[in-house]
Image: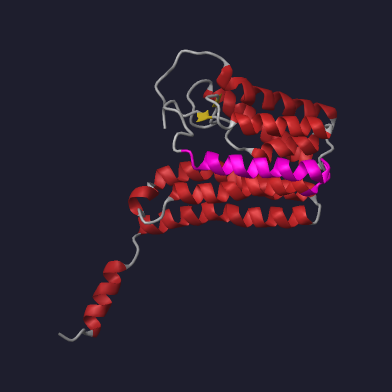
């Protein structure tokens, strides 16, 4: 049977994406924009412009911080099952959380090359395995093991002057911590003290912006504030508490 122009038009109209599909795909594009910020961060790192590198990594972190809520609201896994938002998120996160920071460690001169390259390799290898771990999140929505947030760790390496052996020791400890049953808080999804956690996250963001604007040499009070926030997030999962029902 010959295909008429009318039937082609009807088929095209039938297959046209719905509004929900368009919104869902826009959310995926928003998530993918983090990769563009990752590229810009890498270019800045190649040029040795570390403050600009963290500006772009901060933009990627902002995208990663809100795209999950957007995806859940748009129910993208139902509307566009062909594309995995989780896989997309992991791809972008590996670039911005791991690869660019590892490159900075390897090339910034914070450690001698003979130590910097193995340290960067440890970051890349342990993070790749962590991202492939199907049990990276606990039932109560904590991260299990150090969640490969090397963008934040390396930010502190630039912010606070450290001996290269101290940097190497921190990288080694966190790399090992990737595989340990240690809890790290998810700032938006863990119920316990959620408002406090979000408030401190907001404070950290403001102080981080100040530090970047000041070329990673901010006033002492900014550095102390950032260090205090880091201590909170590091120790949060280690403090015993009575469990509550997790909320997605």
| Residue at image location 47% in from the left, 52% down from the top | 27
Observer-nearest residue: 178 or 84?
Answer: 178
Which residue is more in the foreground, 234 or 197?
Answer: 234
Residue at x-position 84% and y-position 28% = 220
Residue 225 coordinates in the image, percent (x, y): 74, 26
Quadrant where the image shows the N terminus? bottom left
Q: Position of residue 116 (x, y in %)?
A: 77, 43
Visible in this render: residue 142? yes
Which image quadrant for residue 145?
top right
Report the side of 19 relative to 90 (left or right): left
Above or below, 87 against 189 in this view is: below
Secondary structure predominantly adopted by residues drawn in magenta:
helix
Q: Which residues are magenta?
A: 107-133
- Between 90 and 172, the residue placed more toward the observer is 172
User: Is 149 on the left-hand or right-hand side of 8?
Assistant: right
- Which residue of the protein is positioned furthest toward the bottom in this rendering? 2
Residue for point 62% across, 57% down: 36
Q: Is residue 132 magenta?
A: yes
Q: Nearer the viewer, residue 36 or 45?
A: 45
Q: Is residue 14 above or below residue 66?
A: below
Direction from residue 51 to residue 151 in the image, left or right: left
The reply to whether residue 59 is visible in this rendering is: no
């Amino acid at each position: 049977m010959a295909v008429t122009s009318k039937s082609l038009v009807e088929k095209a109209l039938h297959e046209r994406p719905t509004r929900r599909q368009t919104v869902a795909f826009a959310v995926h594009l928003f998530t993918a924009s983090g990769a563009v910020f990752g590229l810009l961060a890498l270019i800045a790192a190649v040029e040795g412009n570390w403050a600009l590198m963290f500006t772009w990594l901060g933009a990627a972190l902002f995208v990663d911080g809100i795209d999950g809520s957007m995806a859940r609201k748009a129910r993208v896994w139902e509307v566009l099952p062909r594309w995995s938002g989780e896989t997309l998120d992991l791809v972008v996160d590996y670039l911005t959380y791991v690869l660019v920071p590892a490159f900075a460690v390897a090339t910034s001169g914070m450690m001698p090359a003979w130590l910097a390259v193995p340290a960067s390799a440890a970051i890349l290898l342990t993070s790749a395995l962590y991202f492939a771990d199907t049990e990276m999140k606990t039932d109560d929505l904590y991260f299990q093991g150090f969640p490969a947030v090397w963008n934040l760790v390396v930010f502190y390496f630039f912010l606070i002057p450290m001996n290269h052996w101290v940097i190497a020791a921190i990288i080694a400890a966190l790399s090992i911590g990737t595989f340990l049953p240690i809890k790290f808080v998810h700032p938006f999804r863990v119920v316990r003290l959620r408002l406090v956690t979000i408030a401190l996250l907001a404070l950290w963001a403001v102080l981080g912006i100040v530090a970047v604007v000041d070329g990673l040499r901010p006033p002492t009070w900014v550095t102390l504030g950032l260090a205090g926030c880091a201590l909170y997030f590091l120790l949060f999962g280690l403090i015993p508490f009575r469990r509550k029902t997790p909320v997605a």
